[in-house]
Image (tube, rainbow, N blue to C red):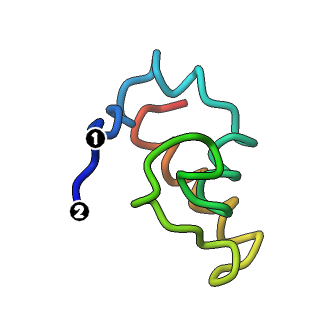
């Protein structure tokens, strides 16, 4: 398997400011296909807790300072 489009740079503040936390939550919880992205991004909502997903979003935001 491969990705048709490589993932965007999550350290780019301009790009990351376009992504609300709710969107990131949905991608992590439901997977890429849930938001029209590549199915290779699996869903984690059945594996990790709501708080873990929120903590991951905070961690992802540290890459860009957003």
Where is residue 43? Give x, y as percent: 58, 68
- 9 vs 62, nearest the viewer: 9
What residue sits right under mark 1 in the picture? 4
Q: Residue at x 43, y 48 (%)?
A: 38
- Residue 45 sits in quarter: bottom right
Task: Please tell me whether mark 2 sits on a helix, a strand or a loop.
Answer: loop
Q: Nearer the viewer, residue 38 or 12?
A: 38
Measuring from the top left, give residue 20's x and y in whole percent: 69, 32
Outermost residue to the bottom: 47
Q: Which residue is mark 2?
A: 1
Is the N terminus in the top left, top right, bottom left or bottom right quadrant? bottom left
4, 21: nearer the viewer: 4
Question: Which residue lies most toward the top here?
Answer: 14
Which residue is at a point 68% across and 40% down the rendered structure image?
23
**Local crowd at mark 2 within 10 Å, few (<14), some, or many (≥20)?**
few
Q: Quadrant of the C terminus?
A: top right
Q: Is residue 65 above or below residue 35?
A: above
């Amino acid at each position: 398997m491969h990705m048709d489009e490589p993932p965007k740079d999550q350290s780019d503040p301009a790009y990351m400011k376009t992504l609300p936390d709710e969107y990131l939550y949905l991608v992590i919880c439901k997977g890429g296909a849930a938001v029209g992205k590549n199915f290779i991004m699996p869903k984690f909502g059945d594996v990790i807790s709501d708080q873990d997903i929120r903590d991951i979003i905070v961690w992802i935001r540290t890459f860009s300072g957003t």
